[in-house]
Image (cartoon, rainbow, N blue to C red):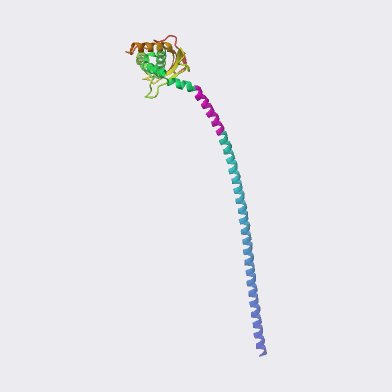
């Protein structure tokens, strides 16, 4: 009996020790898990703090770059504004400088001269027509492709001079008529710049006329007093072409083609 009781006591004691070891193992395991969890949590906090600092630095750097860009843009806009003000002042000065010419071009006398010039293409001097004819013939000679066309080209050149027809309106656009005198009321003469267009080739012919205003005014007064009207294609007097430009530079007119 005593032996059986001792064995039972030993068994109970062994079971209690085993149970105690199991509980200790569980406690150690839980402690290790909590330690690992705490370490992971601390690492996560450190990573988050580092990310927050990096983001803050990036935001600060972007803000500094934006501020610098805004300052550069402000400086550029300030310089542009100053440049625009200078250009505006220059435009106002030019407008004031050219205002007398603009008012002159709209005067009744200039409108009458404009109508008279544009209705008489014969005022274009022969010297200018001949110069343009030579240039057109030279261009045709350079463009010909074979010697067989030389005879045909020569025949065309002979007909070119008589075929040149000029007009002052190009494709329905506004004609060029620019008076170059600011004292047309008191002046004895006036310079007028205009452009004529050759219908076939479309070439421009710049013309500079000197107009005898006294002669035209006297003629106009005489016509009004006698109630006469201009009839036929008679070339009006008082117009002298002093220079022409076929596109290669200005040339003086030696003799008036009228």
As drawn, the residue found furthest toward the left would be: 232
Q: Quadrant of residue 174?
A: top left
In magenta segment, residue 96: yes
**Residue 96, above or below 150:** below
Residue 92: percent from left, percent from top: 51, 26
Q: Is residue 164 left or right of residue 26?
A: left
Q: Residue at x 61, y 53 (%)?
A: 52
Which corner quadrant holds the C terminus? top left
Residues 106 and 164: in front is 106
Q: Is residue 141 visible?
A: no
Q: Is residue 246 left or right of residue 73?
A: left
Which corner quadrant holds the N terminus? bottom right
Q: Residue at x 65, y 76 (%)?
A: 20
Residues 111 and 200: in front is 111
Residue 250: percent from left, percent from top: 47, 15
Per the rendered image, the range of residues in magenta is 80-97
Residue 107: percent from left, percent from top: 42, 20
Residues 61 and 192: in front is 192
Residue 145: percent from left, percent from top: 39, 20
As drawn, the residue found furthest toward the top would be: 255
Q: Is residue 57 visible?
A: yes
Q: Quadrant of residue 2?
A: bottom right
As drawn, the residue found furthest toward the bottom would be: 1
The rendered magenta stretch, by its main secondary structure, is classed as: helix
In magenta segment, residue 74: no
Instruction: Tell how many labels.
Output: 0
Q: Residue at x 62, y 52 (%)?
A: 53
């Amino acid at each position: 009996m005593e032996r059986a009781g001792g064995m039972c006591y030993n068994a109970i004691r062994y079971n209690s020790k085993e149970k105690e070891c199991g509980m200790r193992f569980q406690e150690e395991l839980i402690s290790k898990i909590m330690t690992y969890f705490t370490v992971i949590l601390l690492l996560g906090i450190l990573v988050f703090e580092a990310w927050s600092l990096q983001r803050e630095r990036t935001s600060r750097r972007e803000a500094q770059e934006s501020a610098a860009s805004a300052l550069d843009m402000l400086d550029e806009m300030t310089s542009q504004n100053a440049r625009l003000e200078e250009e505006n002042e220059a435009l106002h000065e030019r407008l004031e400088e050219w205002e007398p010419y603009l008012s002159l071009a709209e005067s009744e006398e200039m409108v009458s001269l404009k109508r008279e010039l544009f209705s008489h293409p014969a005022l274009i001097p022969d010297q200018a027509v001949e110069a343009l004819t030579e240039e057109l013939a030279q261009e045709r000679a350079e463009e010909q492709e074979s010697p067989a066309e030389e005879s045909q080209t020569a025949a065309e050149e002979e007909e070119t001079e008589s075929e040149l027809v000029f007009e002052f309106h190009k494709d329905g656009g506004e004609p060029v008529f620019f008076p170059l005198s600011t004292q047309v009321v008191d002046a004895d003469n006036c310079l007028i710049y205009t452009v004529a267009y050759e219908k076939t080739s479309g070439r421009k012919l710049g013309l500079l006329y000197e107009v005898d205003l006294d002669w035209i005014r006297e003629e106009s007064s005489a016509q009004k007093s006698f109630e006469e009207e201009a009839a036929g294609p008679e070339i009006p007097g008082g117009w002298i072409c002093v220079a022409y430009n076929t596109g290669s530079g200005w040339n003086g007119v030696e003799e008036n083609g009228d």
